[in-house]
Every structure is written in structure tokens, then in C-alpha cells.
Image (cartoon, rainbow, N blue to C red):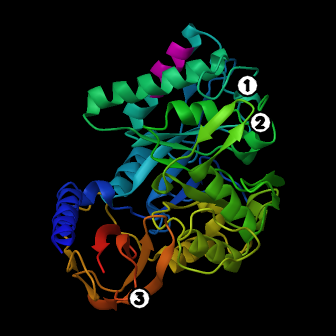
Amino acid sequence: MELRNHLKQFVVLILMIFCSSYNLKAQTTTPELIGYWHNWNDPNAPSIPLNQIDSRYTFVDIAFAVPEVGTDYKMEFVPDQFTTVTFISHVQALQSQGKKVIISIGGAATHVSLDNISERDTFIATMGNILATYGFDGIDIDLEGSSVSVTGGTISTPVDAKIINLIEAIKQIMGNYYTTNNKKLLLTMAPETAFVQGGMSAYGGIWGAYLPIIHALRDSIDILHVQLYNSGSMYGIDGNIYTQGTSDFIVAMTEAVIQGFNTSGGAFIGLPANKVAIGLPACPSAAGGGYTDTTSVKNAIQYLRGLGPKPGIYTLQLIGGYPSLRGMMTWSINWDAVSTCATTFEYANTFESIFGITSSTHEMNQAISVEVFPNPVSDFLTIATDIDLCSIKITNILGEVIQDPIPFNQTISIPTNEWTSGIYFIIITNRHHVMVKKIMVVQ
């Protein structure tokens, strides 16, 4: 009995340390709907004024900043369909709603290569000018083709000048931005699967070529949304091959970047789930391949989040999935808006059906109360919160699901008398938040 009392005191101390260090703003994950916006008019996916895009998009990636003619490093951005003054006013209108407006670098039709220090410094200066002129919140790296390739080295020690220079350039741009604006520059990436998961097949050329960049900038990356389209088939971390356009492909490719994997260039250490979003085309015409029907998308993401059954043959390595998965990205907002490709705003509708409507601001400072008691517990656990319409899931310390997700509204009591003694995690999810509490069961 004395040992049990000491154990209770020890566990209560652990919980106090855990809860007192818990910062809601830092730990809360806001599901994001990320979309690319064309800086040109495509008759099949017409230009849309920024201030008139669907309000469910929380990150708007402007496509693209490109090199000036005759260079592959001196960057420029000029609004194609609007005057500079009008475009800037539209950016500011989105930002006033809590949206983030990002300038994307490159694109499929553009070659960017920083082959030496001089080109690196020009890239830094010209990207800095673009950020200052338009007031963008961040940058997105969307380099394709031969813009990024590896000829040797490893993921942790690249040897290619254009990769080393790109990494250093991004670090410097972010440092300059912080010095000027006293806030972090957002950083997102949209590599194709060959450049990331393709590293499991080979490490050379474009295969795995983004991995050194992701690795070097992992602490700065806000969201990685690999393009799960125009891909063909890829290996999953289970050693099987999966084909684009399926639930299995979404699940396998997503878990690969979270769990990490081995390559001939060394091990790639995965990213946290709250830095990973699902990148898919808005409709069949938006990409050459990889469009996935809405049911398959929803089934895949619900399984990834631990909120639904396995939709195919791929089995997640982490039992219970990844509740803090960051959201969804699409190419593109323009394609999502047209009725001739699919149902108007099909992608935004799918996002809403999975994640719900997200908050209009990314700075959620409001006080949110979640009580889990008693702790330690032996018979019944009570969870009380002022958040409506939650879902609760419970896992043990190994990540095994003890209680499948169940909905509740503010208060719920759960019998624990048949649980074995040990540490458990209470994962409380609603459309705006993912919160985790730790408890101890003593029998």
C-alpha cells in the first residue's frame, strides 16, 4: 500500500509537470486547407480575384515567383491579371481574415538553380524584395524537374552546390525576414513523390533529392504537402508498391514522411504529423494523374487520423493513427472553383466534411478548459470540457488503441476497472483542436 501511494504521488507529479508545460497555442493543431492560386488566366480554370476565393482556404499559395528571363536564380513576381496596387490590397484583405498568403517558388515549368555563391546571394536579395513588396506571410518551395537533383553525398551531408546553396538561401531569407518583421516567415514545401518517397527506390538524380532540403530545414518547416499526383506508383515503408489515385496511396505516402524511411543516402527522419498535409488535385483535369474520388480521400484521411477503419490493404505502423495531421492541399483553387471539372468546390467540400470549418484565425489564444479526473484513476475516468461536439480516443504508452474514438458533448465518464495498470493518453479532438492528456491507471 505504501508503494502504491508513492507511485500515485510520483504520477501526479508527472501529470502536473506535463499539464503546466502544456501550451495550448503551441500544441493546438489547426487543420489547414491549402490551395494554389494561378497568377495567369487559364480558360479552363479562370483567374479569380484573391479576395473572392472560397473562404474555407486558410493558406493561399501564389503560383509562382520565377527567375527573370535569361537567369535561373534572379527571382521576380509580377501580378498578371491585376495591377500591383490591386493585388496587394487583395493580399491584405485575405490577411485581415486570418488567412496566410504564401509566395510559391518555381513550379513545373520553371528551372531554378543556385550554382554558386553569387547566384545564391542574388536569389536571397530578389526573394527578399518580393516578400517586402507584397507583404507575403511565407514562401513555398515547389521546385521540380532538374531544379533539384543529387549526385552524391547523403541526406545529412549533401555535396551538390545547388542543394547546399538553396538550404543556405532559405535560412538567410528567413533570418532577414525575422529581423525586419519580428516574426517567423512561414515555410512550406510541395515536392513530387519521386523527390521524397522515391528515395526508397533510389537515391540519385531526382530520386530522394528533396530529402536533404527537408532534413536541413525541418525545424523551420511549417507544412510539407507532397504532391500525391502525377506520380505513378511508389514504395511504402512496408515494402509494397502503391498506385496513385487510391486510399492506400494516400495512407502509405503520408505515413512514410511521418515515420521516415531508409535510403542508400542514409536514413530520412520523419516529420511530426502536425507538419504534414495531404496534397491532391482538385479534379481530374487539374493534373495528369492521381485524382482521387472524394469517398476514397475521406476514408484515407479518417484512417490516418485514427477516426475510421482501414480503407484498403495498407496497415498503419502506428496504431491509432495521427490525430494531429495538418490538413489538405490542392492544385488548385482555380480548378476547384469551376463546375466543368467536378462539382464546384468539391475539394473544399471534402475538406469540410473531414475536418469541419476551421477557425478564421491562426492565433487561438482563448482559454479552453479540459479536465480529466481523477488522476490516478482505478474505476471511472471523467472528462469534462467547454468545447462542444468532441471525439475522444484513448491509447496506451505503446500507441495501442484502448478506446476507439467516440463522440461526446462536454462531459463523459469511462469505466477503467478492467484496464491494466500503466500510463494512458487521452486524445480529445474536435474541428479546431487536438489536445492530449496523460493519466495513470492503478489497479
Residue 437: image x %, image y %?
A: 30, 68
Say few, some or many: other residues with alpha carbon within 10 Å of mark 1 (under 14 / 14 to 19 / 20 or more). many
The mark found on residue 407 in the picture is 3
Does label 1 or label 3 sit earlier along the sequence?
1
Position of 46 with respect to 443 (left or right) is right
Give SS at disc 1: loop
Q: Quadrant of residue 175?
A: top left
Between the C-alphas of marks 2 and 3, the distance is 43 Å
| Residue bearing mark 1 | 150
Q: Which residues are magenta?
A: 120-127
Residue 157: image x %, image y %?
A: 60, 21
Residue 200: image x %, image y %?
A: 76, 42
Q: Quadrant of residue 396?
A: bottom left
Between the C-alphas of marks 1 and 3, the distance is 48 Å
Please name whichever residue, 319 or 435, is drawn nearer the observer in this view of the structure.
319
Which quarter of the image is occupied by the N terminus? bottom left
Count how many numbered circles sit on residues in the image: 3
- Identify residue type, mark 2: Trp
Give SS at disc 3: strand
Q: Residue at x 44, y 68 (%)?
A: 55
Q: Main secondary structure of the magenta part?
A: helix
| Residue bearing mark 2 | 207
Which quarter of the image is occupied by the C terminus? bottom left
Say few, some or many: other residues with alpha carbon within 10 Å of mark 3 (under 14 / 14 to 19 / 20 or more). some
